[in-house]
Image (cartoon, rainbow, N blue to C red):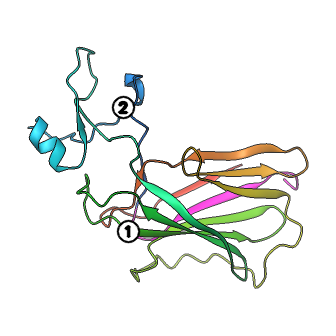
Amino acid sequence: MANKVVASLLIATLIHIVCVAASNNDNSTLIDCYPDKGANANSCRCRGCTWAETDVPGAPYCTFPSGYGYEVIATNIPTDLGFIAVLRHKNQQPTLFGNDAKYVYLSVEYWNENILRLKLYNPHDDRYQVPIPLNNPSSKALNPNYHVNITDSPQFGIVVTRTSTNIARFSRSLSFFLLPDTLPETFHTIC
């Protein structure tokens, strides 16, 4: 496994990323902003979402608008183990879960040549974190086998690329996501 790049995405305790696809003409990418019963144009707009009736079976009427989520306002702020990127919520309208973090930090830590830790968290809310032993390194890897790129154009995303082949091993667009204060911790491991 020496040649594998392993990235763990640790989402801060008691928050959860809800990835929401961009609303466009392809109904398969529309994400229902009002999954509970009783949706109507007024209740949809009160959530900051877009109401558009359609004849397409199964397509939601109430969807997240384009331009929803977080944008990168600062990146490559150095830390002992890597760097931090600062994200800001694009619009502070009411959301599906409510109480979304206005600012979110993305911590990128180079643990060794083959292991990377990505952590999204609210820097203004000291939350309980599950005491899982992680064997944190004391210094960052000097020659990692991967490169991390934070994108913001056309949308926020994370790309982890193997340096020897320049092939993306992890690529996620998180342009429309929420960090509500209501859901449990989530882990995602990729190879």
Q: Magenta part of the protein: which range?
A: 1-15
Task: State the predominant SS element of the stretch in magenta.
Answer: loop
Residue for point 79% across, 77% down: 140
Q: Please state which amino acid type lies under the numbered disc 1.
A: Lys
Which numbered tag is attached to residue 176? none
**Between marks 1 and 2, how big is the CA–CA gap?**
24 Å
- For image coordinates 25% across by 52% down, the residue present is 96
Secondary structure under tag 1 reads loop
117 horizontally vs 121: left or right: right
Query: Camera-side residue: 184 or 68?
Result: 68
Residue 110 place in picture, x, y as percent: 75, 69
Is any part of residue 39 visible from this angle?
A: no
Question: Is residue 160 found inside the magenta-colored segment of the image?
Answer: no
Residue at x 75%, y 71% (from the top left corner): 111
Tell me residue 98's x, y (percent).
25, 61
- The answer, for residue 45, to whether it is visible in the render is yes
* Amino acid type, residue under disc 2 in the picture: Leu
Residue at (23, 57) in percent of width and height:
94
**Which picture quadrant has residue 150?**
bottom right
Specify which label sits upstream in the sequence, 1 or 2: 2
Give the tally of numbered discs. 2
Query: Can you give x and y, in whole percent of width and height, for residue 63 in the image?
Result: 29, 37
Residue at numbered disc 1:
102
